[in-house]
Image (cartoon, grey):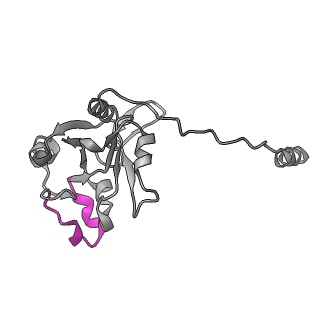
Amino acid sequence: MPARDDILRALRAAEVPPLPRPDLSAVAGIRYDDLRERFAKSVVEAGGRCAVVLQGSVASALLQIPEYAAATKIASLVPGIGNLDLTAVKDPHELAEVDFCVLPAELGVAENGACWITDHGRANRAVCFLAQHLAIVVQASSLVHNLHEAYARLELPARGFSMWLSGPSKTADIEQSLVIGAHGARSCTVLVTS
């Protein structure tokens, strides 16, 4: 295999000249005239649903979601909602039958509809991956235009486990067939509180 060895030797000997990093301090990212409207549209484009609700009416807004209204086992990290005490769950396998999960988000990004979630079950963080349906509650004042703004607000590395969540679980195969709820939550509703 002398040809192979010659190629590998040439690749190892090739030296890429160093380039200075680009100055991104002036990059502001995309901006929107109506932040809430664009965020809601991005959530829908990601396969989810979005509704703007008053701060104290999250519970009544949840009742308007058909999956929530039909749910029997509801986990929630939003105070006053749900019937499953996550702190009492000792084994994540007990979360396999969760119908609905309600989680708070720290940020919402209008650019792509993603929500930054840091507190999603503590020791039982599997609940947001095992629940059949999700609702995310984010404050309107926590919406940002783009990921540049979002990362500027975040303190990284964050304590514990954090994630971006954008819509329900989905996958598309090589036949270009989109399947919602393929390997996780079958629906995701984002409630923007004002």
How far from the left and from the top, in percent, is residue 118? 34, 57
**Start-end of magenta stretch:** 82-100
Q: Which residue is at the far front?
A: 26
Q: Residue furthest right?
A: 2
Tell me what residue is drawn at x 22 percent, y 58 percent: 77
Q: Relative to residue 162, is residue 71 drawn left or right?
A: left
Q: Quadrant of residue 124?
A: bottom left
Q: Give the residue drawn at x 34%, y 44%.
A: 169
Q: State which quadrant residue 123 falls in.
A: bottom left
Where is 75 relative to 34, above or below? below
- Residue occupying the point 83% across, 49% down: 12
At which x and y percent is residue 19? 72, 41
For residue 103, above or below residue 150: below
97 part of magenta stretch: yes
Residue 183 screen position, x and y as percent: 36, 48
**Can you see residue 69?**
no
Above or below 194: residue 33: above
Location of the C terminus by quadrant is top left
Does 190 appear in magenta?
no
Residue sitting nearer the eye, 159 or 59 = 159
On the picture, is 63 further left or further right than 146? left
The number of callouts visible is 0
Task: Say whether residue 99 is visible.
Answer: yes
182 or 113: nearer the viewer: 113
Q: Where residue 68 appears, x then y in whole percent?
A: 15, 47
